[in-house]
Image (cartoon, rainbow, N blue to C red):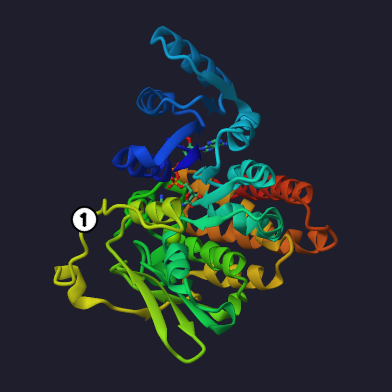
Amino acid sequence: MRRLSILGSTGSIGKQTLEVVRKAPGDFTVESLTCGSDIDTIFDQIKEFRPKVCSVVNESKAMELSSRLKDEGIEIEVLTGEEGNITCATLGSCDTVVGAIVGFAGLVPVYHAVLSGKDIALANKETLVAGGDVIMPLIREKGVAMLPIDSEHSAIWQCLKGEKREDLDRILITASGGPFRSMTRSQLENVTLQDALHHPTWNMGGKITIDSATMMNKGLEIIEAHHLYGIDCDKIDVVVHPQSIIHSMIRLKDGSVLAQMGKPSMVLPIEVALYYPDRGPSIVTEFDPFDAAMNNLTFEPCDTEVFRLVKLAYEAGRKGGLVPTVMNAANESAVMAYLAGSINFLGIEETVFETVEKMESSISRLDLTIDNICQTDKDARIYADELLKGKIK
Ligand code: NDP
Ligand code: MG
């Protein structure tokens, strides 16, 4: 039985994690739930799953939730602020923390969870992009498990089971290509926010949906795979596979290629992580090789001259240090501005490139510590926000 603290329980991954729990309640307990401000959703989740503690970052929303729960006669400790996330992540009664917060905000709670010996089921890729050089050594030092949830990394993990690490030659990470696959640079100049939010195969939170449209999501995933599997970014190829059936592949040194397949759904990778090293019950619709979607599985290269953030992510991953931290922070600021309707689509990319270029030399002297990672994230956001002010439509 796993005793879960779910950080970001009201989001797309958080809700699907609770779907897994709901299907097999005897296999899990829910010790704590956290969110940013969506108290309507967390209220219903608390009623159903009865955690001991919950946390809402927004303080006035936390107070409102607390009084609603009292009125309902539900006894539970309601915490708030970033501290509340850390308390939930380190709760004595929990053994596994599900990292489903979006963005850099997920890093510090996960860091504390690892420090206190929890296994980590990680969806929040920004944690590894910004802080993988600190998190992964700590995972090894503490002897806890890193259980990947991101579907590509789950696929790679499953393919690697039983293989010797030194036999891994390359990773072929698949990408749907997003809503703007096959577009030219000039076509990208005219896309709308509504177009960008319309992902062809996956239904996800707003930030990752935009990251999929710019293909930065794949860039972040290259760096995530580099940290999880200790492989150079140059040994990771992006394969655009619009049907999203093959979730990634590995090539072994003898040339064998192993792939993991399934319909696009995050429920299965979440389940794989939570039941590791066992296998759980079948809760997704059965895979049908005769389904129409299976008739035409196609593969294309990724055009990094059109989707330039993928190229930048390769460079940032190669350089390492705090460069990916800056890239991630600038991307988060730019995506938030784009979601707010303040900048156009290519403004995201411009902001990220300009911020990385500006900050690269000043961060090169800094040691890779959790404090320097947090400070660099802040500094990069301040710089990116300044740039964004000048780009407002
Ligand atoms: P959503 O935007 O749907 O959900 C984000 C969650 O984080 C919400 O519960 C939100 O609370 C919460 N949150 C935001 N800020 C804070 C904070 N400071 N403290 C606590 N909680 C916070 O995102 P997704 O579920 O789509 O994505 C979550 C992570 O998983 C991302 O890193 C994403 O890249 C990754 N991922 C997602 C996939 C997907 O299919 N969705 C696939 C693979 C990876 P509130 O609702 O109150 O705002
Ligand atoms: Mg993914």
Q: Position of residue 52 (x, y in %)?
A: 50, 24
Whether residue 296 is visible here, answered yes or no, is: yes
- Camera-side residue: 18 or 345? 18
Q: Is residue 55 left or right of residue 371?
A: left
Residue 347 appears in the figure? no
**Above-or-below relation of 157 to 37:** below
Closer to the camera in the image, 105 or 278:
278
* Extreme residue toward the right, this view: 365
Does 265 sit left or right of 341 as displayed?
left
> Could you tell me residue 69's position as x and y percent?
43, 14
Identify the residue at image location x=42%, y=41%. Answer: 14
**Mark 1 crowd level (few <14, some 14–19, many ≥20, 10 Å Cα):** few
Q: Which residue is mark 1?
A: 285
Quarter-of-image position of residue 295: bottom left
Residue at position x 58%, y 65% from top?
228
In the image, farthest residue toward the top: 71
Q: Is residue 343 above or below residue 179?
A: above
